[in-house]
Image (spheres, grey):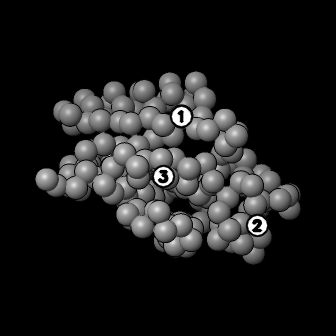
Amino acid sequence: MPDRLALYPGSFDPCTLGHLDILRRAIRLFDEVTILVAAHGKAGLWPADQRVAMIEASLAAEPDLARCRVATFNGLLVDEVREREAVAVVRGIRCAGDYEHEWGLHGVNRTLLAGFETVWLPARPELAAISSSLVRDVARHGGPLAELVPAPVAAALVAEPPR
């Protein structure tokens, strides 16, 4: 039986503890999960290769995430699903607004690729308020980052704070 691969797409600009929590839960459901870093992230804080390197450093600290891979993508998600033969896309949901947005994306993706499946995982309540944009704001003002992002990301934010 082939491995059951799921894709976890996003800008990850920056990767947060909420992202890693969704990843930890997704890897229990699938044989492998590939984090797909959008080559052109929404915020443009870091280039894709730097975001990939920080995620890989964060994963290296967690042996239970050894079946996770990181790659970049540019283009339509359905093309990545088809090319990689993924069985599902994983998305985290923090609030009702996220669900509405994700529902629309799922509908379009399902129209473009019959059989497209999305697995939505709700954020744990203690992590639901963490978003990449709020992390950038905290870092911009020199706030504490340890409870928001993995250590490699925190170090990068301290070394190169957002403007």
Q: CA distance from mark 2 to mark 1?
A: 29 Å
The residue identified by callout 1 is 122
Mark toward the start of the polypeptide (2 vs 1): 1
The residue at the point 51 percent across, 28 percent down is: 99
From the viewer's perspective, is 56 left or right of 86?
right
The residue identified by callout 2 is 161
Q: Amino acid at mark 1?
A: Pro
Q: Position of residue 16 (x, y in %)?
A: 62, 54
Q: Does residue 49 appear in the picture of this structure?
A: yes
Q: Position of residue 79 (x, y in %)?
A: 25, 49
Give the structural element (helix, strand or loop) at label 1. Answer: strand
Q: CA distance from mark 1 to mark 3?
A: 12 Å
Q: Position of residue 111 (x, y in %)?
A: 25, 29
Q: Does residue 52 appear in the picture of this structure?
A: no
The residue identified by callout 3 is 23
From the viewer's perspective, is 85 left or right of 95?
left
Give the structural element (helix, strand or loop) at label 3. Answer: helix
Give the structural element (helix, strand or loop) at label 2. Answer: loop
